[in-house]
Image (spheres, helix red, strand yellow):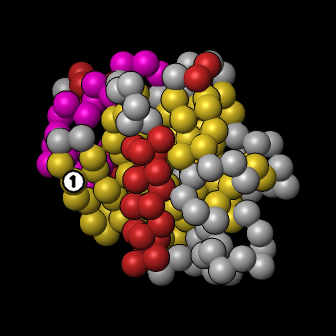
Amino acid sequence: MSLRFSRLTALLFCLLAAACEPGSGLSPRPDLSVLGGTMQIGLPSGYCIDKGASRDNGRTAVAFLGRCAANAKTQPALISIAIGEPGSAGVMTAGGPELAAFFTSPRGRKTLSRNGRAKDLRVISASGGDNLLRLHLFDAPIGEYWRAITAIRGRLVTISTIGSREQPLAPVEGRKLLDAALSRMQAANRQNQ
């Protein structure tokens, strides 16, 4: 395994390991400026940022989104968006096929697993191109979900869409929500890239 993947493993473990449920501090704004204004969190329609659960330390940021209203027609889901340090997008130079191969390996599955055990994570599918990897995953602690890994403004960005045990996201709905969140993040950060 190359040094590039060792760094990828460490970075992704730090960025992706956290999981939580949305709290009560939801913000209905369409976009939210983070990292001193250098990045925007773009929100899919019907979803709001949970400010109480989200973090921005000036170098990295993690935002958790839930639907804005419990009685809304929007699919109940947790969307997590993690933004890495400046220059962290360099791991994307490996390309989609090589990244997919890494994440289907025991070491890659361990990196993605919520409890750090490769045996508890199954990669259902992995696809993408040079600047994007989409993963359809089953993780024993949380069930089936989708994750995208991409580069925006030189930073590694990961987006996950997760249902709950009571109301899991159907695979097609999880992918649709992932693509909507990814599209909003790209659009919100397109200017001055």
Q: How many tags in the picture? A: 1
Q: Residue at x 64, y 60 (%)?
A: 47
Amino acid type assigned to the residue bearing label 1 in the image? Gly
Left or right of residue 162: residue 158: left
Residue underneath mark 1:
128
Tell me the chief SS of the magenta region. Answer: helix
Left or right of residue 9: residue 62: right
Indicate the position of residue 3 as horizontal and vertical percent values.
24, 22
Q: Is residue 57 visible?
A: yes
Residue 156 vertical placement versus 42 (above, below): above
Q: Residue at x 61, y 19 (%)?
A: 36
Q: Mark 1 packing: few (<14 Cα in 10 Å), some, or many (20+)?
A: some
Q: Is residue 21 visible?
A: no
Q: In front here: 74 or 148?
A: 74
Q: Residue at x 25, y 59 (%)?
A: 126
Instruction: Give the quarter of the figure containing the C terminus.
Output: top left
Give the secondary structure at mark 1.
strand
Q: Which residues are magenta?
A: 85-107
Q: In front here: 74 or 98?
A: 74
Residue 40 vertical placement versus 162 (above, below): above
Q: Residue at x 64, y 65 (%)?
A: 46
Outermost residue to the front: 191
Q: In front here: 141 or 132?
A: 132
Indicate the position of residue 134 as horizontal and vertical percent values.
31, 56
Outermost residue to the right: 24
Indicate the position of residue 155 as horizontal and vertical percent values.
40, 28
Instruction: Give the quarter of the figure containing the N terminus.
Output: top left
Residue 111 vertical placement versus 57 (above, below): below
